[in-house]
Image: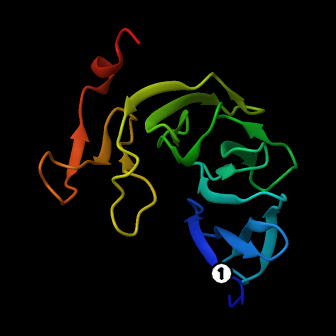
């Protein structure tokens, strides 16, 4: 697939048949496109007047979470794949860089204040989500080269995270694995 437009983030469907990319358009900023790997055809997935970016397929490939500024601030939304036109907002206040727990029962996202948020979800029939809850703070300014978020990875069970932090007195950014994070948020 060759396109004259700039593309940034992307994700591959779990079955390996599709890629979702955010692609730059002169009239609307970034929008989400689906690329079929079987025939190299591209189709529009999400197009709003705002920026739509950082797509992530659900583990079962039936949903895509992404960030959009359509509400006036960046928020995390979910749509079916293939798209039916329905859309659900899962973040409140702001949210970027969605990540799915491997069993598909939770979405994690960064808020702009440097807190990793978790949203329990249910996808049987229709999409339903609980209110977001804070997990732990991170330094949003410590971003490794080539990454967009300090929260690099989520363990399959959603109980451990790979987060880039800055060691005290250091100019480098080592990785820190946060274990037993529920203890960090007790009493909040």
Viewer-closest of 156 and 11: 11
> From this viewpoint, which residue is outermost toward the front?
169
Quadrant that contains the N terminus: bottom right
Vertical placement of 28 versus 167: above or below? below
Total marks placed: 1
* Quarter of the figure with residue 24: bottom right
Q: Residue 77 falls in which quadrant of the image?
A: top right
What residue appears at the point 28 percent right and 18 percent down from the top-left corner?
A: 183
> Farthest residue in the right direction?
85
Q: Position of residue 21 (x, y in %)?
A: 65, 69
Residue at position x 38%, y 35% from top?
157
Q: Which residue lies furthest to the top in this view?
A: 187
Residue at numbered disc 1:
6
For residue 26, above or below residue 180: below
Tell me if 52 is positioned left or right of 49 in this view.
left
Q: What element carries label 1?
A: loop
């Amino acid at each position: 697939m060759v396109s004259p437009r700039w593309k940034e983030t992307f994700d591959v469907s779990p079955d390996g048949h599709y890629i979702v990319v955010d692609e730059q358009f002169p009239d609307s900023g970034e929008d989400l496109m689906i690329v079929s790997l079987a025939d190299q055809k591209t189709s529009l997935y999400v197009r709003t007047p705002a920026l739509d970016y950082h797509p992530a397929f659900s583990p079962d490939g039936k949903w895509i979470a992404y960030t959009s500024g359509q509400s006036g601030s960046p928020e995390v939304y979910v749509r079916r794949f293939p798209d039916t036109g329905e859309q659900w907002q899962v973040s409140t206040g702001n949210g970027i860089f969605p990540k799915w727990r491997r069993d598909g029962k939770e979405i994690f996202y960064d808020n702009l204040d440097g807190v990793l948020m978790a949203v329990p979800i249910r996808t049987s029939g229709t999409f339903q989500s609980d209110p977001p809850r804070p997990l732990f703070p991170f330094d949003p300014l410590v971003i490794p080269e080539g990454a967009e978020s300090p929260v690099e990875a989520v363990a399959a069970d959603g109980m451990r995270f790979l987060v880039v932090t800055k060691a005290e007195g250091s100019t480098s950014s080592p990785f820190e694995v946060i274990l037993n994070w529920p203890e960090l948020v007790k009493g909040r």
